[in-house]
Image (cartoon, helix red, strand yellow):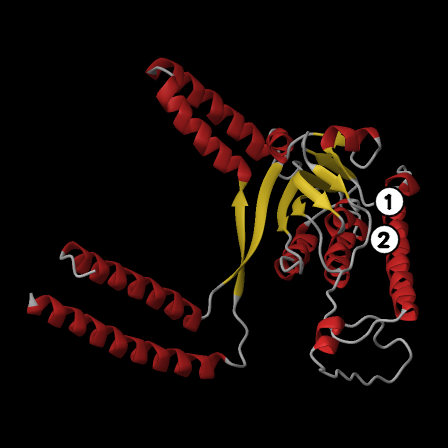
Amino acid sequence: MEWLADYGMFLAKAATVLLALVVLLVMIVSLKDRHRRPDGALSVNKVNEQIARMTERLAQSVLDKKGFKLRQKGRKLDAKSRSKSAEERSRVFVLCFDGDIKASAVDHLRHEITAVLEMARAEDEVVVKLESGGGMVHAYGLAASQLVRIREAGIPLTVCVDKVAASGGYMMACIGDRLLAAPFAMLGSIGVVAQLPNFHKILKKHDVDYEMLTAGEYKRTLTVFGENTEKGREKFREDLENIHRLFKNFVSRYRPQLNVDEVATGEVWFGIEAQEIKLADEVQTSDEYITRRVREADVFEVNYVTRKRMQDKLAGGFTGIIDRLLVVWASRFHNQKFW
């Protein structure tokens, strides 16, 4: 069985050499790309054609030959009539925003909106499929400002919420001319929260001093390691109340039909309830709405895609190779009962 041990050592040496080569290559590429941002490109998918292809495939399986041919003739006539009135048909641009706590998706959203606003006409429409449980105030403030650009350009904006648009997510959603929510989508949470641990008592117990120097009375109100004062807590609460006030004013501006004082309690409501208290305009899924719009307009799904840098691709590929080598090596030794 010595040859198995030798073979294992050979694999380990080969993996080490491969790792060294990949690290060297990644370092070289990183030096070249240090001052170059990753390239991005706009991906556009015509939803009308996508649905037509899926329906075609289903019809081919379900209908007999005669029925399928009749359907094909009808579709050709319909396509001709649509092509004649192509200039008159309105266009719908569908954007997707899946928000994390930092609203990272805004980096793509801003490019998508810039491109769409260059093409959109007053008779067109922008649909944003939004999902977010909220996050940082400044990050979602910027994300909301991107949707405001659409409103200010005079382009009808419809926001669809299938799962959740809470806190910062609702701050974005309320900007829509129309807000559609799935029956059990969660909306609301018009409130502000902040929390942080404090280790002052632990440090004091172990005779550890912590010093923090500031210039400005309220440069730091609450700290993680220092002793917090009631004055600092009061200022922190005051700041939270101020942010909450700005949040409520923002929602009131774009949804004047909503009684903000009644809903700005930090609570959430599901789609049907949200419609009753005017947090949403209609109970409807994004699939239902977009499918209906496909019959009336040309619908385009727009995504800004960032290309991965070479070092990211190499790192990902190398990780996969190492994983496979380890699996093969482990399975061989396990089968020989060396473990």
Residue 111 figure quarter: bottom right
The answer to which of 173 and 125 lies nearer the viewer is 173
Where, quadrant-wise, is the N terminus in this rendering? Answer: bottom left
Q: Is residue 282 visible?
A: yes
Q: In which quarter of the image is the C terminus?
A: bottom left
Would you name the residue on which mark 2 appears?
247
* Tally of numbered discs: 2
Disc 2: CA contacts within 10 A as few (<14), some (14-19) or many (>=20)? many
Q: Do the residues labelled 1 and 2 touch (CB within 8 Å)?
A: yes
Q: Is residue 31 left or right of residue 130?
A: left
Along the viewing direction, whichever of 315 and 116 lies nearer the viewer: 315
Query: Which residue type does callout 1 highlight?
Result: Ala
Q: Where is residue 96 in the image (x, y as percent from the top left)?
A: 62, 48
Residue 84 pos. (x, y %):
58, 33
Secondary element type, mark 2 = helix
170 relative to 111, above or below: above
Residue at the image point whose x is 85% and y is 53% from the top = 247
307 horizontally vs 317: left or right: right
Q: Where is residue 255 in the image (x, y as percent from the top left)?
A: 86, 42
* Amino acid marked by disc 2: Phe
Crowding at mark 1 (Cα within 10 Å: few <14, some 14-19, many 20+): many
Q: What element carries label 1?
A: loop
Q: In this view, does 7 lie above or below 118?
A: below
Q: Which label belongs to residue 264? A: 1
| In the rendered image, the vertical position of residue 186 relative to residue 76, given as above or below | below
The foreground one among 56 and 14 is 14
Nearer the viewer's eye, disc 1 or disc 2?
Answer: 1
- Marks 1/2: CA–CA distance: 9 Å
Image point (16%, 54%), residue name: 335
Q: Looking at the rendering, which quadrant does residue 300 occupy?
A: top right
